[in-house]
Image: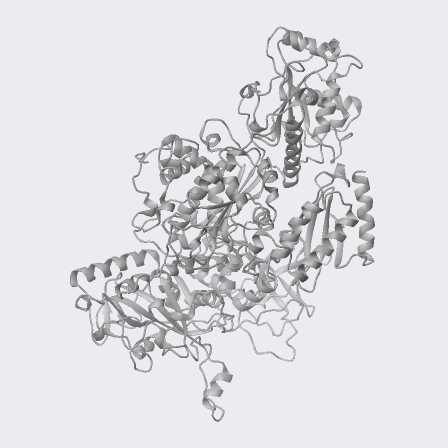
Amino acid sequence: MTLKQFNADLAAAVSKVKAKHFDRIISLRKGESDGELSITYENENLKTPLRIQVLIPNISEYPKKASFLIFTENEDIPAALAATLARLQDQSTGLDVDAMIITLSRSLTRDLQTGGPASDDAASDTEEDYNYGSDDDDYDEDDGDDLFGIHQDDPGDLDAQAEKLHPRLKQDLRTARQHGYKVGIIQSAPTNNIVSISVRASKFKLPEGTLEVWGIRPEEYVVLLIHQTGPYLTLEDIVHPKPYPERRAHFRIGKCAHYKPSFMEALRAFHSPTDDNSPASGANEGEAKLKKIFISNSLDQFLAEGLLNLIKIRDIEGISWDQANEVLLNFQIGTDTAHTNITTTPCKTDPAFAGTETPQRFRHDHLGDEKDGQRSWPLVAMQFAMRYLLACTRYCLRCHRRVQGDIETLKPYVCSNPLCLFQYLSMGLGPSAEHEIRSQPKVVDLLVSFCYTGLTANRSAANPVSCGIREFPVGLHLRVPDIRPKPEGPFLEGTITDDFQTFKFQVAAEHLDRFIPKQWVAIRLNTPPGELGPLTPVLTPVPTPVPGKEPTHRAEAGDLVHCQIESIDYLNQRIHLEPGIDTGSWSSPRADAHKAAKGQACLLPYVQEFDQLGQGAKRLMMAHLLATLPSISDIKKFLDQNPLSKVKDMPRISPAAMSLLNWIIASNRSCIFETGNPELPGNNSSAPASGGIIPGMEGWVQFRFLQGSPDKESLFQNARESVRRSKHLTCPSIFAWHGSALPNWHSIVRTGLNYAETHNGRAYGHGVYFSSVFGTSLSYTRSSQLSFGIWPNSDLRIVAAISLNEIVNSPGDFVSTSPHLVVSQPNWHMCRFLFVKSEETPEEKAAQKNPPEGHQYSQPYSNYPSHPGNARDTKYLQQDPSRTAIDPLGHPLNIPLAALPSYHHEKSQTSPEVIDVSDNSSDEHDSDTELLASEDDESPPSLSTDTSKTDFRPGTLDLGSLPRLQPPQWSSQLGLKKITFQVSQLQTLQSRTPLHELGWYIDFDQLDNMYQWIVELHSFDPSLPLAADLKMAGLTSVVCEIRFGEQYPYTPPFVRVIRPRFLPFMQGGGGHVTAGGAMCMELLTNSGWTPISSIESVLLQVRMAIMSTDPKPARLDRSAMSGARTDYGIREAVNAYTRSARTHGWTVPEDIEKMVTGFSAARSGA
């Protein structure tokens, strides 16, 4: 029984699902490939139905020996189900479709009810004791460090599992473990391994504040996954001149509650989209889930693009990682003198860790320090990853060069190269907008609000362009509508008609081909042709449109409406538009609010290059784009309801608005956190703890800065330390308030305070003005000469902002100290806290004027807790008694130490809190101990080379004389999976079958390219003329090549002889070998090939064809008989194959040409 039987069983099962024959199986369908099916399982204990994919790789052996690959598309599943699916893969061999579905359904239902089977991942870490301990105690007694993936409850699997491991891989992992890392095998196969190397975050010895900003808990593990396809790659293979494929090793770095993720999580990590925006799930802590960390995207890409090349460069040149990276970057940009200005003198101290207290285990350089003996490249990869993780704030996230500056920030960013900024945003290397919105929606609201206010600010009639935005998002290739009074870009004038649901735009027929459905456009309503006039900023709320619901407003003349084209009616010359987002002025709702404005209008497509606009047009366009965004709370709700979606997937968000939102989030280099009650609406429990809240600030939303912008912070700390030393101060800094108009804050949170512009006069000298008294600074937040808009869809609706700043305590050097502190030194002050006031609604204002009897009205949208806890347990900063900050009630302000940078802890005789969670272990599993203790592993089954039965000797072929190709760029996941499975099957068969019986040989250790195999056919029947010819020519095998095409397994591989040359058919030869060396067989054309054909059968039939004497036996060409080596070329082989197929009426595969041109240039040979 084969594929035909499988399809029949599947069709019957589909009918049974429709009749509800299977318990809890709600859908079943055939997959995209043969032997694949999709199952949907539902259970009241699951939030969403479970989507399960089942693949039978050996469909030709269905059902008796067929095995099942079972995995799920769901992102978040209980650990019990992951273990169930993994177990079912081993237990389902030999079942038919019906039995497999019944087993699957019953197992899932039972394990959901009982909590699932015991497993190493689910049971080993359930009650870890996270005590503080020494750095030398590395191994948990309950850690389950199953070096080779052996289940605790099944030690009998040791031999079977170890047999699958490459001996060198086992040795390399032992080396990594000896250096203090935890290792594990997640998947083990001869040509497909997934290994994990991990370390607990507490071992980094970083302050808790740093881990908090990075989103990593001390008890979590940082895990590096290495997925290697093909034969195991050793460090010697990487360093030596021997060619190797570029993408044989794949990497993923993340965090996990356990020392290794589950099998299903590892599969997701390598096969899911790289831009993980799924929320932090409410999964049980016991689940071995792998989650991305803040630097995952950047580091994954760096590992994939550079690690293998950097290892080779470092080892050959004897230089550091930074120097090797410079060499590689220069080579990539085409610089001939790759080593120009690059110091090749070995560095005694790694600059990545200069001036830090990084533990020695992370400073150790296995590649550079240990030249003797066999080195472990998985250990090198882990050390490389940890180096860039721990020093990430010193390096650019894109080019990975050292950034300028002598201080680390808490958040990594890019260097000053504009290309790095563009790639940082466009390639998703920076902070995920989805993650930021889910974790800290108020901070995102704050950043967008500040930007919008800065854009809409008009300081005076004489200078309307002046605003709080000093840098614009240029270089991002934003496409926007041209909203200038006289557009220079394309626009279209027409007439708006009304259909009560969407706009219809009547245009001339010749203009219709300029537009396509889903294209974004902007419409100026009721605007006569040629009279667009100026467009004003948005100053009023913009209701968020609801899809499928008619508008609740009436559009006004001159309004700008943003929408997408729904469809184009070519017959009636109309463009149908989806419901739009009006960013012009809005009138109050009326009875006829459903009626859209009719009349002349101008349609402006999103085709204008943003960078070409003037500064005034840029800020106006940015304001209108931000006005089209929904509120952050609405976006968060959408993401929560659609955990696999991105912000750009939300209806009615244009690409331009999405790019602008990304820029606002990513370009902010300050670390801003909301403090306050975590139960407040919109606050996220994953945000920093609220222990740093400042009392006495009721009615204000509080934010804290763990670090200012990098360049300013560096200079400030240098100045503070210099003053402390020179004046021997106990309190080298003081705190004071600064009030500024709202439009200024977009720049302040990025670059700090300065006095480049004068807004309120400078009666007491030039400098930045501060006050110890809150009320004094509050008065400067209001300005009668400045108008600005509030971001229409803001939840915060900020009307005022005031900061609490840290200032170098040297009043004698200030411009003035009374009545204000005037500081002219731009690097002597840093904003540490920010307080914002929300606009009151009419209902709130009325409630304050006439509060209910006995009711004390609280201020709107404050994060100040009603019961902040026991103040006695909070440690506060010791301030200079003569310069103490005063709160709104006139009392001395108490500033919690928990909310301040770490150096304040040191000066307050409180050391920075370094978290170290103990992971002692003294009782490792017996199976692990036994395996680790073994010095040498048994060699794999040896090949029988009885000289009495064959004269063939494996390993004697000079592979360097043959064409060796790089893997193709077009390789598919299905094709690679099928080839990998075939390699595994053939390798097992070859290791267990005597050579003379098998008749073919593949050197799997030299199989660099999975899409190109070299096969030797040998041990032919001595009675054949071919055997005699080979012996006379001094040869023991026929060397063949197999190439797999782009559409494999749906198209056959291409098989040809490379050497020796055969006597052509026209000259009396045979053996089904064409004049160009290709095999003349229907099996190897589309006419005779089926996707279920195995390569084992191909090799068998090719060998039989060559041995065939009908109509004539195969003979060698005279040139081969004389000892001359004249190999067949690939082009002549393909040409002969094509001619032969056409002669017989066989169909040639469409991808045959790519067999020649689709691979990279040959490394050697023809």
Q: Quadrant of residue 666?
A: bottom left
Residue 305 higher or lower than 617, as above or below:
above
In the figure, is residue 1031 to the left or right of 622?
right
- Which residue sits furthest bottom? 853
In the figure, is residue 734 to the left or right of 888?
left
Residue 914 higher or lower than 147, as above or below:
below
- Residue at (18% x, 65% y) in the render: 813
Residue placed most toward the observer, 601 or 332: 332
Q: Quadrant of the C terminus?
A: top right
- Residue at (72% x, 17% y) in the render: 1073
Q: Position of residue 1043 (x, y in %)?
A: 64, 28
Residue 382 makes an appearance in the image? yes
Q: Position of residue 385 (x, y in %)?
A: 44, 45
Q: Quadrant of residue 410?
A: bottom left
Residue 18 higher or lower than 460, as above or below:
above
Coloring scheme of the render?
one colour
Residue 568 makes an appearance in the image? no
Residue placed most toward the observer, 131 or 1127: 131
Residue placed most toward the observer, 915 or 812: 915
Q: Position of residue 696 (x, y in %)?
A: 36, 79
In the figure, is residue 8 to the left or right of 995?
right
Q: How many marks?
A: 0
Q: Quadrant of the N terminus?
A: top right
Residue 299 higher or lower than 341, as above or below:
below
Q: Position of residue 931 (x, y in %)?
A: 52, 40
